[in-house]
Amino acid sequence: MPVRDLFTRHPASVGETYGEHLVHATGFGVRMMLGGLACVLHGLLPFLFVRTGSRQISRLHGAMVTGRAKPLPGVRDFVI
């Protein structure tokens, strides 16, 4: 397998170029870290960030799962 395929196969499977995927995945990661930090601070100081964690999860889920144009091959939705 050519090295280029390691960087382009997954992005192509979700309809993105490598650059687009880099921007989207990095954006999601930063939002997840900030949401996680808000949850930690909420645990210490329960009067802060009361809805921030759940709101961030809903937004990210909406953007990544329900907003997806096409389903990923071989990936099924599941409920916990």
Image (tube, grey):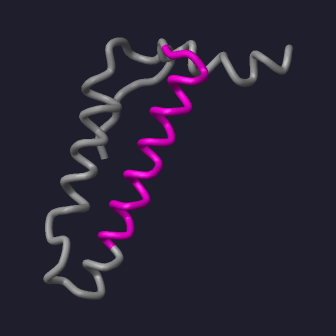
- The spot of residue 6 in percent (x, y) is 75, 23
In the image, residue 19 lies in the stretch drawn in magenta: yes
Identify whether 42 is placed above or below 64.
below
Question: To which quarter of the image does residue 24 belong?
Answer: top left
Which of the image's four quarters has the N terminus? top right
Instruction: State the residue lying farthest toward the right.
Output: 2
Residue located 84% across and 21% down the image: 3
Q: How many marks?
A: 0
Residue located 49% across and 37% down the image: 25
Question: To which quarter of the image does residue 13 belong?
Answer: top right
Describe residue 77's horizontal placement relative to residue 73 as left or right.
Answer: left
In this view, the residue in front, 13 or 21, is 21
Instruction: State the residue lying farthest toward the bottom.
Output: 44
Identify whether 23 is placed above or below 29.
above
- The spot of residue 10 in percent (x, y) is 60, 21
Question: To which quarter of the image does residue 12 belong?
Answer: top right
Residue located 37% across and 51% down the image: 31
Residue located 56% across and 16% down the image: 17
Q: What secondary structure is the magenta-colored segment mainly?
A: helix
Describe residue 63's horizontal placement relative to residue 34 as left or right.
Answer: left
- The spot of residue 66 in percent (x, y) is 25, 27
Q: Which residues are magenta?
A: 16-39
